[in-house]
Image (tube, rainbow, N blue to C red):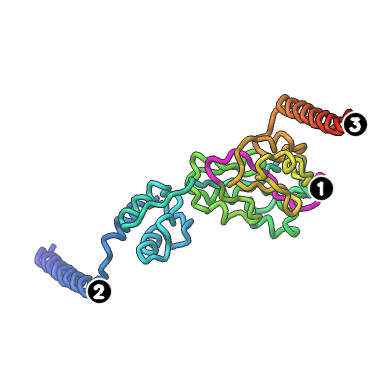
Amino acid sequence: MDFKLILEGIAVLGAMGAIFGALLAFAAKIFYVEVDPKQEAVRACLAGANCGGCGYPGCGGCAEAILAGKAPVTACAPAGAEGAAKIAAIMGMEAPSGDKMVAHVLCNGGCNAKDNFEYRGVKDCLAATKVCGGDAKACRYGCFGFGSCVKACKFDAIHVIDGVAVVDKEKCTNCGACRAACPHHLIVEVPYKQKVFVNCSNKDKGPAVTKVCASSCIACGMCERTCKFDAIHVENNVAVIDYSKCKNCTMCAKACPRNAIEPIPTPEEKEKFKAAQKAAAEKKAAAAKAAAEAPKAE
């Protein structure tokens, strides 16, 4: 073995490494792009999930957009109010205020909804919309239950239970990934403190709705007439809650004959509600009768 050749080879490789290293160092210095130190500070306040919910390419893109004024300090929903407050401090701005928001699925069909046929294709909601006009479910507005939203969520905050997607609001960061993944646009942004929801999105008229789902809204208006806060109205054949007015009293849920409003009351709660409504109606009728008879007595 010729050790001289080995040593020469090592020396040549070492020299080449040193030359290329120097060239790279020189190029790095020449082409160096100065980065605002605030960008790294802002990025450190983000969730770090690179979920894309902000609409920018990863957390780096989001931080850059915030510094450029193209995105608000609240752009990263998973970072929450605490992260937004830290970013605001870095930017020399006032911390934003407002209620925490989470995702919610406006459907409670699942196993309660009828199937037109057994779907055996790719277990993906968007793919299901391409097969036979997307009519695997008799309700063309409902949740397919194939879990595209579950796959999109990076925080394990949504799961398919009894054939319909359900959000765990304690884990939800409101990143918007599940909303973007739902082809029927059933997932909406709601206040964290909200407890009452109309879990139906079917806009067909009552008779058609009852044929496809056992727990659908039939636009009967009972909830609207029961609410004392003007917080729920029937729009396009489905009840819609104004969360800014809703007091979470659950009276609309008790009035709903189809159990389409969450939280679903127990049979005992339903009976108590009906009894109270009947007593109130009788009292009102008695008062009206007394008022009508008063002038006659005089």
What is the x, y in percent for residue 291? Answer: 83, 32
Q: Quadrant of residue 229?
A: top right
Residue under pointer 1: 206
Residue under pointer 2: 31
How many angstroms separate mark 3 from mark 2 (CA)?
Answer: 99 Å
- The amino acid marked with disc number 1 is Gly
Tell me the residue at 79%/31% (across/down).
284
Does the magenta-highlighted stretch encompass residue 56? no
View extreme (right): residue: 296
In this rendered view, identify the residue nearer to me: 220 or 168: 220
Q: Secondary structure at mark 1?
A: helix
Q: Local crowd at mark 3 within 10 Å, few (<14), some, or many (≥20)?
A: few
In this rendered view, identify the residue nearer to me: 6 or 36: 36
Residue 187 seen in render: yes
In this rendered view, identify the residue nearer to me: 150 or 106: 106
Q: Looking at the figure, which quarter contains the N terminus?
A: bottom left
How many angstroms separate mark 3 from mark 1 (CA)?
Answer: 45 Å
Residue under pointer 3: 296
- Earlier in the chain: of badge 2 and badge 1, it is 2
- The amino acid marked with disc number 3 is Lys
Q: Quadrant of residue 25?
A: bottom left
- The label nearer to you, 2 versus 1, is 1
